[in-house]
Amino acid sequence: MSTFLTLLKMNIRLLLRNKGFLFFLCITPIVSTVILGLKTGDSVYFEEEARSRILELENVTERAVYAGDTTAFLVKVYDASGTGLSEYVLEELTASGMYSVCRADAGGMTEEAVTEQAKKDAFDDRAGVLLYLKPDFDRGVLEGNLEEALLTYTVAEDERLELLEEELTEELSQLHSLSASTGMDAEEITEFLKEMEEQLPKKEVVSLSGKKDIALTAEQTACRDRIGYAFAIITLGFLFCGVCVAHTVIEEQENKVYTRIMLSGIGRKTYLGAKLVMALMISVLQTVILGICLFVAGNTDFGMNQFAFLLLIFLLGLIFSTASLGMGILLGDVMSSNYAVFALWSISALLAGLYFPLDSTSAVLKSISYLMPQKWFLRAAELLFVGDKSVYSMVICITVAYLIVILSVSGVGLKIRRADS
């Protein structure tokens, strides 16, 4: 036991002198923390937000294409009315989910000025239609005179434009009929319609999925994407830290230190066991550093319990640090090991779907993706999102299986290498 501890102390001292080891040990958890905290770049979450509310533009010259959801029918509104009734009409458009409404304040602008701006936007912007809500919007709607209420500038030829015009005409006609039958003014009609909406049952969207599918919300999908990017960065650190451990083995063999250690009576199993414990310590250290970074940043909102997330990181790190250690020992050259682990990192992250979804790829690529550890751990994250507690036993079994394969291949490789030498 004392011999084993002596080997561990010697390896720890060697690693602490390696600046590359310290760099990857500290930097990758920090970068992963930053990625986990990013929320502005979540395209799915952004698209859902863009379809569910009116997006405000700073001025009429701002392009709607930069603010709206381009997958929906983009509507740019020059609002010179600014009343509750015009707000209600635009909210009804966004509620359909088919249109992305971007509104700019056009108060104080003449109709001629709005028309000139619409001509520019017709060429410079990508809105499908431009709407000008006139200052007398309320009076025009209540009197049934739509020409005094709004002006439409058609930009794109799209079948949804006809649906938009029909929906607007029907909505404004209903408002006119309500005013004519009740005698209420615009403000009273707006309050009445909002009270009616509050009494209606709320719409709830329920997604159905099969045994192999998991129904995630838009926010959970965004969290999964961030976790995938974090997996990609943190595994890079695990791999190169493992190479640093393998570097000690290579140096000891080149400097005949390994021979002296064997002559001292320390068995090969004890020697390799110390290196494997170092790989385990790397996983623990990087997981602890990542946990500290998350605590300091106050970033715990990524769809699951923080302890569960750190457990996934630790087990994933154990796989990759052990793999890079075995790869470095087999190749016997630091430069070749660096090339090999970088290739392993790049290909595995790509095939696991950490950067791009694999839903539209071929069946062969989908099957290959299940050979990548990150794929299983990303799947585990999805299960944790929906509260499946069986995920813990799954990831532990997957980790053990990968370690058995890695150690077996490494052992066979070392025997073949010794036989050739």
Image (cartoon, rainbow, N blue to C red):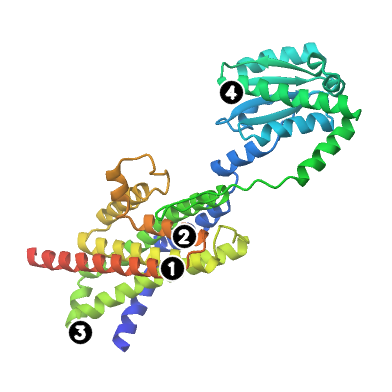
The residue shown at (30%, 61%) is: 324
The residue shown at (32%, 47%) is: 366
Measured in 3D between alpha carbons, the distance from the residue under mark 2 to the one under mark 1, in whole angstroms, is 9 Å
Q: Check the image and name the residue furthest to the bottom.
A: 2
Query: Residue at label 3?
Result: 264
Left or right of residue 69, residue 393 in this image: left
Q: Amino acid at mark 1?
A: Ser
Measured in 3D between alpha carbons, the distance from the residue under mark 2 to the one under mark 4, in whole angstroms, is 38 Å
Residue 213 percent location from the top left of the image: 43, 52
Q: Residue 182 lies in what quarter of the image?
A: top right
Asked whether 130 or 268 is in front, the reply is: 130
Query: Which label's residue is closer to the chain start, 4 or 1?
Result: 4
Query: Residue at label 4?
Result: 160
- Callout 2–callout 1 Cβ contact below 8 Å: yes
Answer yes or no: is residue 348 visible.
yes
Left or right of residue 417, residue 399 in this image: right
Q: Does residue 270 lie above or below 198 as drawn? A: below
Q: Does residue 292 lie above or below 167 as drawn? A: below
Q: Amino acid at mark 3?
A: Ser
